[in-house]
Image: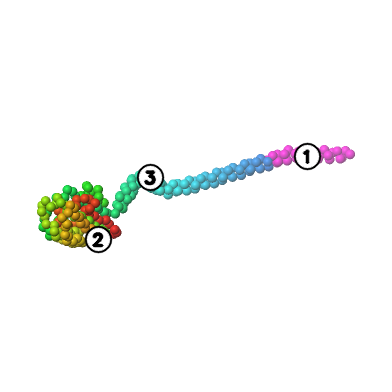
């Protein structure tokens, strides 16, 4: 019994002596684990920070590169914004000019009154003076020296109508109208030539026996198509111009462009 108690005492005594050592060993192990864990966490945090920094650096480089690539476009866009109003005004003017120029060239001129043609030789031709109304009846054409002048080359239709009348007041001069010639000619002049030679385009009319009555009238109307160049002129001559009717609806001259 005594021997057993002694052994128990010795075992308890040994355990008591080993307990602090085990406790110290266990504490050291726990501290090592804690320090190791903290070290690993620190390394992971550092690695994570480095990775984030590298990612941000690459992203910033991409942004800078993209900005550098886009900046010329932005500058061009800015320049475009500045140039747009000027370009817009020019385009509007150009559209207005083109719209204005789309009108086909034309002219329609009535005889200029009062007419002052004296009785002359029946065989003499007189060039008719027309009333251009300060150009109101001219579209992309000119009128000068009794001639319509072409500004734009093309194929034109040229026409003229002249009315002749004889009334009792004309008999005061005792002109002979028993066998009168009433002719109308349309002429073409090429002003680009060094020597201008009028060419007859059309001729119409006849020799009439006028009745000695209060009023007599005879009208001549003709027209044709012709290719005209810029600067060309057209005009009208008639015989016995002193018999011309001064009414605008009876005696007129004109042309209009059909095609190029």
Residue highlighted by disc 1: 15
Q: Which of 242 and 144 is in front in this view?
A: 242
The kind of secondary structure element at disc 3 is helix
- Colour scheme of the picture: rainbow
Q: Which of pointers 2 and 1 lies earlier in the amino acid sequence?
A: 1
Q: Does the magenta stretch include residue 26?
A: yes
The kind of secondary structure element at disc 1 is helix
| Closer to viewer: mark 3 or mark 1 | 3
Residue 219 lies in what quarter of the image? bottom left
Residue highlighted by disc 3: 81
Q: Nearer the viewer, residue 235 or 70?
A: 235
Residue highlighted by disc 2: 224
Q: Which of 120 and 175 is in front in this view?
A: 175
Q: Residue at 68% across / 42% down in the picture? A: 29
The kind of secondary structure element at disc 2 is strand
Give the percent coordinates (x, y) of residue 244: 17, 53
Q: Which of pointers 3 and 2 lies earlier in the amino acid sequence?
A: 3
Q: In which quarter of the image is the C terminus?
A: bottom left
């Amino acid at each position: 019994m005594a021997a057993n108690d002694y052994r128990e005492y010795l075992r308890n005594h040994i355990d008591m002596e080993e307990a602090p050592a085990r406790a110290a060993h266990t504490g050291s192990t726990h501290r090592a684990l804690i320090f190791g864990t903290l070290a690993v966490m620190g390394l992971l945090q550092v690695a994570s920070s480095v990775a984030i920094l590298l990612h941000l650096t690459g992203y910033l480089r991409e942004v800078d590169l993209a900005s550098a690539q886009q900046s010329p476009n932005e500058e061009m866009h800015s320049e475009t914004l500045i140039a747009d109003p000027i370009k817009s005004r020019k385009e509007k003017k150009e559209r207005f000019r083109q719209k204005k120029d789309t009108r086909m060239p034309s002219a329609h001129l009535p005889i200029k009154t009062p007419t002052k043609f004296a009785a002359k030789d029946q065989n003499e031709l007189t060039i008719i003076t027309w009333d251009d109304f300060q150009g109101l009846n001219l579209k992309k054409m000119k009128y000068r020296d009794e001639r319509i002048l072409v500004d734009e080359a093309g194929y034109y239709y040229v026409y003229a109508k002249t009315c002749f009348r004889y009334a009792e007041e004309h008999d005061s001069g005792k002109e002979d109208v028993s066998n009168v010639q009433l002719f109308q000619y349309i002429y073409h002049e090429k002003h680009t030539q060094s020597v201008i030679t009028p060419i007859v385009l059309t001729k119409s009319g006849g020799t009439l026996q006028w009745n000695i009555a209060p009023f007599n009238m005879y009208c001549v109307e003709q027209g044709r198509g012709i290719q005209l160049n810029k600067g060309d002129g057209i005009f009208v001559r008639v015989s016995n111009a002193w018999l011309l009717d001064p009414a605008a609806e009876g005696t007129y001259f004109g042309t209009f462009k059909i095609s190029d």
